[in-house]
Amino acid sequence: MTPTQPPEPVVIGVDLGTSSTVAVIGAPGRPPRTLLFDGSPLLPSGVAATAAGRLLTGRDALQTATVDPAAFEPYPKQRIDDGSVLLGGVEVPVPRLFEAILDRVLTEARGTGRLDDQPAQLIIACPAAWSATRRQTLLAAAPPATRLVDEPIAAAHAFADHLADDGALAVVYDLGAGTFDAALVRRTADAFTVVADRGIPDCGGLDIDAAIVAHLHETGDPATWSRLDHPQSTAEHHARRQLWDNVRAAKEMLSRSSTAIVYVPLLELEVPLGREQLDRLASPVIDRTVSVVRDLLATADLSPSDLSAILLSGGASRMPAITTALHRAFGRPPATVDQPELAVAEGTIRAATEPVLAAPSVLAEPSVISPAPVSELLPARSGGRYRRTAFAAAAALTAAAITTAVLWKANAGDGTEPPRTAALTQSAPASPSPSPSPSPSYPEGVDPCLLGTWRFTTNDAYGLIGGVQVLYTGGAGVLVTYRPDRTTVIDYTNMEPRTAKYGNDTWSDVHRGTTSGTYYAANGTVTMTITHSDAVDTVRRNGKVNATGPVTYFPEPEQYRCIGDELTSYSTRGSFSIRATRQPATPN
């Protein structure tokens, strides 16, 4: 009897934006379909809490905001680092905000009839520059088996036809409601990779809307404008929301026509707005974004002629003034799609269904699990030595791709094993490797951009405690030196401890000593072979030594991005992420 093949999963691509969220569903044998929320492809990302503690999304959340503004968080994505937010006097963990949004996406997906009994997998796009901690916050809100894809990688998939050649380079210009991101993306034989990225956290379509509102202040009674700017009653809150909706609608209309009318509630005015006026009001925002793109190319030692395309993504990028500004600045018209606000979400679907071009991503693991019994966490001696612990501390060593793991485990036998695959990797970034002038000759496997000494500024890694995967953060101060003869030294003398919370306990680990070996770097991936190590790891629980022993190394290809004096690297198995800065050369 032939075994029944499991059904192919339905893929749901999500672009969780600052102001709006977009989702696309792709079912086997059917074309992708954009999900609609209250009749619109844009789900407002804002979340509101009811008095009973229920979280509302979409129009329901906006309606609640007009009655109880204190119970509404309009931009959850901007609160990613805050831990929790206060909604209506109730403290709500930030992952719960994301969970409410994703639950709404899944509810709408079920309403399409495409799920039926088939499994579903979420593919969520996130900023390329997000740290391991931010990614884990998002994944903590997502269902199991969720994958993350960098936003510029997803956008590149949506514009794949513009990057047909192996090695083609493009700038993804992503102007959303609240933020701007520019990323340099390269196409290789089997992936899109982020070479470099830059961003502005306070620059987006909302800033252009604010400029229009400021312009409208020139008309009407100042006292009435004060009621719109600082509403007190429910009616005034409704009027303020209507004003900003009208401004946004007029801005979008001016992408298709030369004039629009903005109705100002309370003032009962209809104010004409022309495209030339809009372009003038938007120019400070647009000029900032163009400067970022210039800086991105300069940092990567590239000129506009090295690009195959400039790709427009994000709803705010549809303005003709942006197309004109980029064409003037870089000598080429940018590539556009009819609905740039859908580009990232549609690209996540393509990234999931076109494996040849899929950027590496990983499965989400649960991060909050009931604590294991204390007996599983305490060290146990047997025959005068410690057993190996549940702490699988991927030590996040170097951009030379070693996952260092110390596995001291109270509830397992002796023997080491690599850490479990964690939920945080980014696409494999290739280093542009700008060479000094005059350019010396280096042996194969040497990336000139890596040469020198680097100091870790962040060194986040996953470990296991009681069988639970826990994120350890910290670990700054490690020094890594890469030499032209392909030898390397890792110095842990000044490493700061990494710490993690598990249950009611605080755990930490720190390395001391040095290791040395050889490395091989090519195409944004580096591997290392250790030839000598006296490094020792110490694990503490609530400040008391839990276990100590030699650091064990697991050779593992590591993806890295080296731009000037900044180095970012990610374990290919998702166990760590590192940021480092180049140290000044010491005189001979």
Image (spheres, rainbow, N blue to C red):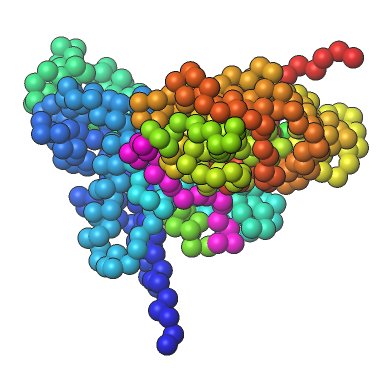
Asked if 293 appears above or below 38 in the picture, the reply is above
Q: Residue at x 74, y 28 (%)?
A: 534
Residue 83 drawn at (x, y percent): 35, 26
Q: Main secondary structure of the magenta part?
A: loop
Image-based side of 112 in relation to 254, left or right: left
Q: Is residue 8 left or right of residue 289?
A: left
Image point 83% across, 30% down: which residue? Answer: 483
> Which of the image's four quarters has the C terminus?
top right
Q: Is residue 141 visible?
A: yes
**Left or right for 560, reference 120:** right
Residue furthest out toward the front: 383
108 over 222 or under it: above or below: below
Q: Quadrant of residue 538?
A: top right
Magenta stretch in the rendered image: 355-373
Q: Give x and y (percent) for residue 63.
A: 14, 35
Count up the numbered dots: 0
